[in-house]
C-alpha cells in the first residue's frame, strides 16, 4: 500500500492516549495530518476498515496489516496517517506538540521541549502535563 500526498502536512503531533499506544505498540503514535483531497492511497481494494470509536475509522492494508490512515468524523476534511506509514520518501516531519500527556505510558519520559497538552480531552494545558518531563 502506497501513500502519496499532493500537499504538505497540516500538522504533525505525538499522541499518548491509550488507544494510540495500543495501536502502535509503542509509547505514543506520531500522527501526520493531510487534507483529505491531497492524499492518494492507491488501490482501495487492498484496504479494510473498522470503527475504533463512534467518530474514528481506521484503515488497514489487507495484505500486510499496516495501519494506513484514520478518519475522524469531527474533522471531515483531514486524514491522519501514522508517520511510520509514510516510508522513506516522506517529507521532513517536525512534530509540534504532545497530546494526551496525562494518559502517557508511565515508563516513558518525554525528552523534548515540545508543548504538552492533557486533561480528559487530551488537548488542555494542565499542571501535570507541563511537569511531565
Image (spheres, rainbow, N blue to C red):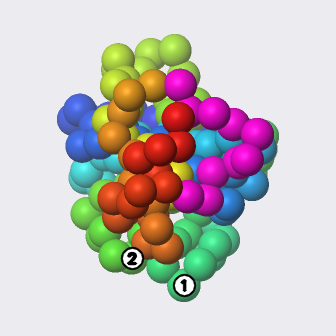
User: Does residue 65 appear anywhere in the picture?
Assistant: yes
Whole-angstrom CA distance, mark 1 to mark 2, is 8 Å
The reply to whether residue 68 is in sight is no
Sequence order check, earlier mark of 1 and 2? 1
Residue occupying the point 25% across, 50% down: 35
Which residue is nearer to you in this view: 100 or 87? 100
Q: Please say if 29 is above or below 62.
A: above
Q: Please report the residue visible at 45 percent of the width from the left and 25 percent of the height from the top.
A: 112
User: Pointer 1 and pointer 2: residues touching (CB < 8 Å)?
Assistant: yes
**Callout 1: 10 Å neighbours few (<14), some, many (20+)?**
few
Q: Is residue 89 magenta?
A: no
- Disc 2 is placed on an element classified as loop
Which quadrant holds the N terminus? top right
Residue 94 lies, with reference to residue 116, above or below; the image says: above
Tell me: 6 left or right of 129: left
Residue 19 spot, x, y in % from top left: 66, 62
Magenta part, dominant SS = loop
Taking depth in this image into account, of 73 and 123 the one nearest to the observer is 123
Residue at the bottom extreme of this rendering: 54
> Residue 65: x percent and y percent?
76, 46
How packed mark 2 is, by other alpha carbons closer than 10 Å (few <14, some 14-19, many 20 or more), is few
Task: Indicate which disc residue 73 carries.
Answer: 2
Residue at the location (54% across, 84% down)? 54
Residue 131 place in picture, x, y as percent: 47, 44
- Residue that mark 1 sits on: 54
Magenta residues, start to end = 102-111
Write the residue at 75% across / 54% down. 22
Residue 2 left/right relative to 75: right
User: Image quadrant of residue 51?
Assistant: bottom right
What is the x, y in percent for residue 60?
66, 53
Circle 1 SS class: loop
Amino acid at each position: 500500500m502506497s501513500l502519496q500526498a499532493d500537499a504538505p502536512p497540516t500538522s504533525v503531533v505525538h499522541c499518548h492516549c491509550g488507544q494510540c499506544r495500543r495501536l502502535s505498540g509503542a509509547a505514543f503514535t506520531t500522527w501526520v495530518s493531510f487534507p483529505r483531497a491531497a492524499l492518494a492511497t492507491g488501490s482501495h481494494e487492498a484496504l479494510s476498515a473498522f470503527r475504533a470509536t463512534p467518530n474514528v475509522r481506521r484503515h488497514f492494508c489487507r495484505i500486510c496489516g499496516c495501519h494506513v490512515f484514520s478518519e475522524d468524523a469531527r474533522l471531515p476534511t483531514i486524514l491522519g496517517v501514522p508517520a511510520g506509514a509514510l516510508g522513506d520518501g516522506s517529507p521532513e516531519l517536525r512534530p509540534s506538540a504532545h497530546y494526551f500527556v496525562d494518559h502517557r505510558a508511565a515508563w516513558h519520559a518525554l525528552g523534548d521541549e515540545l508543548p504538552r497538552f492533557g486533561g480528559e480531552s487530551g488537548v488542555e494545558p494542565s499542571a501535570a502535563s507541563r511537569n511531565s518531563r
